[in-house]
Amino acid sequence: MQRSPYRHVIWDWNGTLLDDLDLCIDVMNGLLQRRGLPLLDRARYHAVFDFPVRAYYERLGFNFRRDSFEQLSVEFITGYEARRAESRLQPGAREVLAALQRAGVTQSVLSAYRGETLHEIVGHFGLTTFFIRLTGLENIYAHSKTELGRAWVAELGIPGNDILMIGDTLHDLEVAETLGVDCVLVAAGHHSAERLRQRAGRVLDDLHQLRSVPGLAMAV
């Protein structure tokens, strides 16, 4: 049975539309190296990165008695922001956004990125006109975007089964489940395909494969 078309797509930003995986690893390795802690490669990063971010920092071995989580967050974000222009969009991101827009599907971003910075980086890539809302957190500590998502879905006034969330982590799946919306995960960001497929039913290798998702109308 063919499902009815989705009317709205909620995008995650970091790792989903923005390819910042290597930048995140490199910046974090700077923090780790300065403290004599084991460095990250992609495999270890994919294994330990998670939300809440505080737990991820604990897994990396940071001593919060010496460096508070807040101090470490500031150090990471400062390093990340100084180099954020090194990141690129995921392959196919602009094309997929344009295809959905042409098909009449509205789109928004729900991110753990700080709201003001989210607007800046989306504008930097010239993507602002694709979205009817950009929603980010109020601080840099990346606790959760669930409450913001609830408020946004309520404001949209669209039934949950007409909304698709697209992300790159199991946290995105958890948020989608809490919001009562459908979810597709793309294994090109901060969690590996193997880790995603342990929990998620729909995992794609890249954004180009979104064209095969039932109900996702995309005008070529």
Image: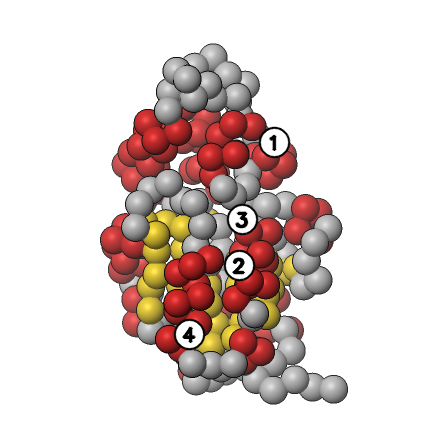
Callout 1: SS: helix
Decide: few, some or many residues near mark 3? Use Cα within 10 Å; few <14, some 14-19, many ≥20: many
Q: Is residue 5 above or below residue 116?
A: below
Q: Which sits in the foreground, 54 or 102?
A: 54
Of the two numbered discs 4 and 3 on the same chain, state the one appearing first in sequence.
4
Of the two numbered discs 3 and 2 on the same chain, state the one appearing first in sequence.
2
Q: How many marks?
A: 4
Amino acid type, label 2: Val
The extreme top residue here reads 36
Question: Circle 2 is placed at which residue position?
Answer: 175
Q: CA distance from mark 4 to mark 3?
A: 28 Å
Question: Circle 1 is placed at which residue position?
Answer: 44
Residue 115, image quadrant: bottom left
Amino acid type, label 1: Arg
Q: Which sits in the foreground, 136 or 129?
A: 136
Decide: few, some or many residues near mark 1? Use Cα within 10 Å; few <14, some 14-19, many ≥20: few
Circles 3 and 2: CB distance less than 8 Å? no
Residue 112 in view, yes or no = yes
Circles 1 and 3: CB distance less than 8 Å? no
Q: CA distance from mark 2 to mark 4?
A: 14 Å
Amino acid type, label 3: Gly
Question: Circle 3 is placed at which residue position?
Answer: 189
Q: Residue at x 49, y 55 (%)?
A: 16
